[in-house]
Image (cartoon, grey):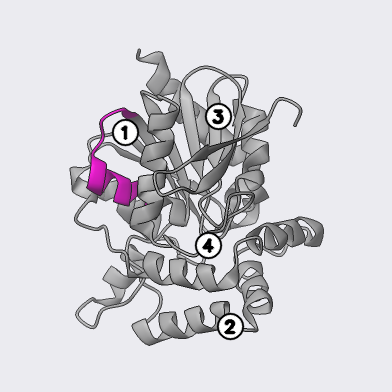
Amino acid sequence: MERTESRTFTTSDGVNLHYLAAGAGPPLVLLPGWSQSAALFQKQLDAFSDHYRCLTLDYRGHGESAKPDYGYRVSRLAMDLREFLQALELQDVILLGHSAGCAVIWCYLDLFGEAGLKGLVLCDQMIARIRRPEWSEEECRQYGAEVGGDEVLAQAELVGGPEGPAKSAEFLAGMFTASFSEAELLQVIQESLKFPRPYAAELLLSVSAADYRDLLPRISLPALCIGGAASHLGPAAMPWIAEQIPRGELAMIAADAGGSHFMYLENPEAFNAAVKDFVDQLTEKE
């Protein structure tokens, strides 16, 4: 904890974003999921900072970042990431995204390409969330397409409404295995609720509408895809994503080993070991 520094930078549209920094060496940038905060990556910062320069970002509205009334869409978060990497003059960056952090990475690649990047770690995110009538059940499982469009709108209405905090807590609680402690779950919920719920609803709609299937075959970077066998995405989504990326690799964490959507919190040892092995292989080739 003592080695971690709290810093800020300002985006081109005037928003002060908070980030945590620890360690030195090859840059590893960790991106949280929807409504999650940089603080939840502390076990990763502790584990990796002896080997890498670790940076984890609070998106606008999230965690300790400023909370403007604009910009809650995946494309703006991708631009914020771009400006963050530029402000710190980072090169040969390895991006690690959890959940919606993967959508931010995919949007970044779509908009800005792979220059300055060295590798990707993609952790438990559907490639397309909203089911389409023309997709088979197998395709829906592979894409992680779990809800209909009307369901997404209803979810956003609940999250952004007066019951938002309570509904968000229920939503998050369902993403952990029964072995996860109540005290740790409470911390996750408290960090999530630092993101104002009306803004969270806007971002939920943006993330849910995203579909990056056509991007995956065009990714030339090495990519480690990590999934949880007990995740609400189901066991098919991350293997399918790994297969679509030419240099994709897969690591699945078992259901009885904390393999939930939040496996980096439930089983940080297994998660950190998989990430470190992947990053070490990339950096040893220099």
Residue kind at label 1, given as amino acid type: Pro
Q: Residue at x 36, y 48 (%)?
A: 78
- The answer to whether residue 272 is above or below residue 180 is above
Q: Is residue 11 left or right of residue 212?
A: right
* Total numbered badges shown on the rendered structure: 4
The amino acid on which the numbered mark 3 sits, given as a three-letter code, is Cys
Mark 4 highlights which residue? 231
Q: Residue 10: say if magenta.
A: no
Quadrant including the N terminus: top right
Where residue 67 appears, x then y in whole percent? Answer: 56, 58
Foreground residue among 8 and 285? 8
**Numbered disc in front, either 4 or 3:** 3
Q: Residue at x 51, y 68 (%)?
A: 199
Q: Residue at label 2?
A: 161
Q: Point out residue 89 in the picture as x, y percentages from the top left corner.
A: 40, 24
Say which residue label 1 marks: 222
Front of the two marks 1 and 3:
3
**Circle nearer the N terminus (3, 2):** 3
Vertical placement of residue 139 versus 184, above or below: below
Q: Are marks 2 and 1 in contact (CB under 8 Å)?
A: no
Instruction: Check if mark 1's residue and mark 4's residue have beta carbons within 8 Å.
Output: no
Q: Earlier in the sequence, mark 2 or mark 1?
A: 2
| Residue range corresponding to the magenta coloring | 104-117
